[in-house]
Image (cartoon, helix red, strand yellow):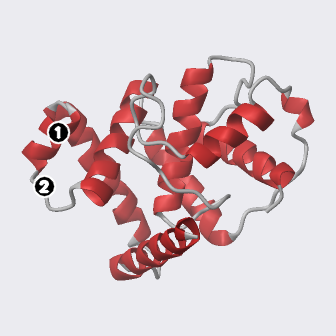
Amino acid sequence: MEDKKIVASLYQAYTRLYGKTPDLNGDRQDLTIEFQAMVYFLREYGVTFLRTSFVAEGYRDIDMPMSMELQDILVSLMFGNASEEINEVVEFNKHTNKMLNILASEFEHIHNTSELRMLVKLHFTKEEVLPSIADAELCNYVHASSEDFQMYASFIANILDELSNDDKTQSNIEEEKTQEFHKLKIINFF
């Protein structure tokens, strides 16, 4: 996908997911967290705008797993630009629309960027770093409170519940995630 289309897709997805247009001249740290969390969770459920992988410590002051490819796009093509410059209309497919709706519904319960950051940290660590870790050890590892973990568990359970309401079964979702992971692994290997 060309850069202009990626930027337009990210902008429109952000608007749908958060129910507001991003202030591209606003606080870059908050915007980074919001865009990174959005792309991370969309990618986890089969929606990708760019080939990207997430690393545990992209920027220490952000303190969450990040995609450096996404960050390059945010810094070079989005931050500091006027919203009017991003005027390409993007139509999302059925699966993308469904995931945007599900995540938008769940993101309504997130009150700040600290909670977004914690959701990504917990999920990334549980899925990518230490998949067999017990919940209490996971919280200890990422310095999460029991309230943080409850928020995370509820967030994931609600997403999976919504996904199970259609023809996508949990095994299909896991298979899609595995396929996406292998594609990313192959792409990043070369």
Q: Residue furthest front?
A: 190
The residue wearing badge 2 is 133
Q: Are marks 2 and 1 in contact (CB under 8 Å)?
A: yes
In terms of depth relative to the viewer, which is nearer, 164 or 83?
A: 83
Seen at 69% across and 36% down, the residue is 74
Q: For residue 131, what is the image quadrant?
A: bottom left
Under circle 1, the secondary element is helix
Give the SS element for disc 2: loop
Confirm whether residue 40 shows in the render. yes
Q: Quadrant of residue 112?
A: top left
Q: Amino acid at mark 1?
A: Tyr
At x 68% / y 40%, what residue is drawn?
72
Q: Position of residue 34 (x, y in %)?
A: 55, 34
- Residue 141: numbered disc: 1
Image side of residue 128 versus residue 13, left or right: left
Horizontal and vertical percent for residue 6? 76, 52
The quadrant the N terminus occupies is bottom right
Residue at image location 34% in from the left, 48% down from the top: 155
| Label 2 crowd (10 A; few <14 / some 14-19 / many >=20) | some
- In three-dimensional space, the C-alpha distance between marks 2 and 1, rounded to whole angstroms, equals 9 Å
**Residue 32: x percent and y percent?**
57, 31
x, y percent for residue 65 = 42, 42
The quadrant in which the C terminus is found is bottom right
Apparent side of residue 81 relative to residue 122 in the rendered image (left or right): right
Q: Is residue 15 visible?
A: no
